[in-house]
């Protein structure tokens, strides 16, 4: 179901973003395009919540601790929501105690997911005032403490216990007014538990709420490996050159058109293959800097195509191959790696233009 929903969302999100970037778009058409993009992102959030909850329920999410730059991660979280806060006229701020270590050893991706959920909720339920993220560190217990405080609608005391229940909201009017699946806080609680911590909430009706949690987070380990920086990328990663030749492999013409448009907009040269077999044939005769490979295709799928390209007696046997697929479950990622692919990007995709 995830694959079948994500595949059409790739076209909806991608082409609506390209449409909004057109310089001669009328004001009315631009407004409609923004509504399409906004609605599709809401749908994507629902899909992601259900997928994450399903994986948590069956124990398919594993912790991957690494050395992370704490301040960078927290500043990114604020920056990601800056526009949303500004649109509502809310003050969004970050306070980090000076004694917090610069680097910690924990799963930054899961920490970011928890924080994003809490900040998104705080902004959703706050009409006037502010949202504040506060971070502190307990060295004696090797714990990172974070809180998100808002001046929003608050929750009645007798309803607080329902907040972390799956598919639950305080009452029907919340669902009608603000939307949502009722899974976000349940996912947060399970992720916090997975990171060896606890989460709490204090709230006063019509005054606001504070969500507090802590996770186990020893100070960064001494290592020769790079420290994970903003966006989960490796610090010092090389930017995309503007003279790459890229092969895009996908059986759906809509997806190929979208990826071509996104890449050509940032100066890349693109060739297309509509099947795994066509990709192998093109890799035998042309040289590529990067191959973007769909996984689910009729005939020769992306896994078989990647293995065949790796076995070629040509320079493309060493060309980076990145899967672009709506299949995002752990076994898909593992199978991509085993087939010789270097990385995996989940659909839907878009690039800032």
Image (cartoon, grey):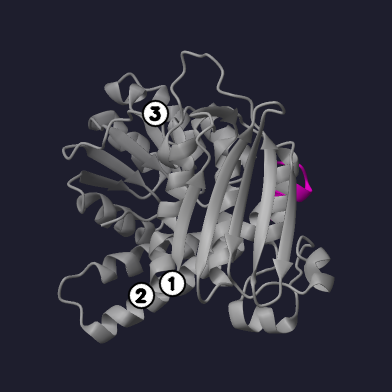
- Quarter holding residue 353: bottom left
Q: Residue at x 20, y 54 (%)?
A: 265
Q: Residues within 10 Å of mark 3 (few under 14, many from 20)?
A: many
Q: Position of residue 221 (x, y in %)?
A: 56, 18
Q: Nearer the viewer, mark 2 or mark 3?
A: 2
Query: Dot 1 corresponds to which residue?
Result: 38
Q: Residues within 10 Å of mark 2 (few under 14, many from 20)?
A: some
Query: Dot 2 corresponds to which residue?
Result: 34
For the residues labelled 2 and 3, the Cα–Cα distance comes to 40 Å
The vertical placement of 2 against 71, above or below, is: below
For the residues labelled 2 and 1, the Cα–Cα distance comes to 6 Å
- Specify the segment rendered in magenta: 53-61
Q: Classify mark 1: helix, strand or loop.
A: helix
The vertical placement of 129 against 94, above or below, is: below
Q: Confirm whether the magenta stretch covers residue 120.
A: no
Q: Position of residue 76 (x, y in %)?
A: 43, 47
Residue 309 - label: 3
Q: Residue furthest front?
A: 98
């Amino acid at each position: 179901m995830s694959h079948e929903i994500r595949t059409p969302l790739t076209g909806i999100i991608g082409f609506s973003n390209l449409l909004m970037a057109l310089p001669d778009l009328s004001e009315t058409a631009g407004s409609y395009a923004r509504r399409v993009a906004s609605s599709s992102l809401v749908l994507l959030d629902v899909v992601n919540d259900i997928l994450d909850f399903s994986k948590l329920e069956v124990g398919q999410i594993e912790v991957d601790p690494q050395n992370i730059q704490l301040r960078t991660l927290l500043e990114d979280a604020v920056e990601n929501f800056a526009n949303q806060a500004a649109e509502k006229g809310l003050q969004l701020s970050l306070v980090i105690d000076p004694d917090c270590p610069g680097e910690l050893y924990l799963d930054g991706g899961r920490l970011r997911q928890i924080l994003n959920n809490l900040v998104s909720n705080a902004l959703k339920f706050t009409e006037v005032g502010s949202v504040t993220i506060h971070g502190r560190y307990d060295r004696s217990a090797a714990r990172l403490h974070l809180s998100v405080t808002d001046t929003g609608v608050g929750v009645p005391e007798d309803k607080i216990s329902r907040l972390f229940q799956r598919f639950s909201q305080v009452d029907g009017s919340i669902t009608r007014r603000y939307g949502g699946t009722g899974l976000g806080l349940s996912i947060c609680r399970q992720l916090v538990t997975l990171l060896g911590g606890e989460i709490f909430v204090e709230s006063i009706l019509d005054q606001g709420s504070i969500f507090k949690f802590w996770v186990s987070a020893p100070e960064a380990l001494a290592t020769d490996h790079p420290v994970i920086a903003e966006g989960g990328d490796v610090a010092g990663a090389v930017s995309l050159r503007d003279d790459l030749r890229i092969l895009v492999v996908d059986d759906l013409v809509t997806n190929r058109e979208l990826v071509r448009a996104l890449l050509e907009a940032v100066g890349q040269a693109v060739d297309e293959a509509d099947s795994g077999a066509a990709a192998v044939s093109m890799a035998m005769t042309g040289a590529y800097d990067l191959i973007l490979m769909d996984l689910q295709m009729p005939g020769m799928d992306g896994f078989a195509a990647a293995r065949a390209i790796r076995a070629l007696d040509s320079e493309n046997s060493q060309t980076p191959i990145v899967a672009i697929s709506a299949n995002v479950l752990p076994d898909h990622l593992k199978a991509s790696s085993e087939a010789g692919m270097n990385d995996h990007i989940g659909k839907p995709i878009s690039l800032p233009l």
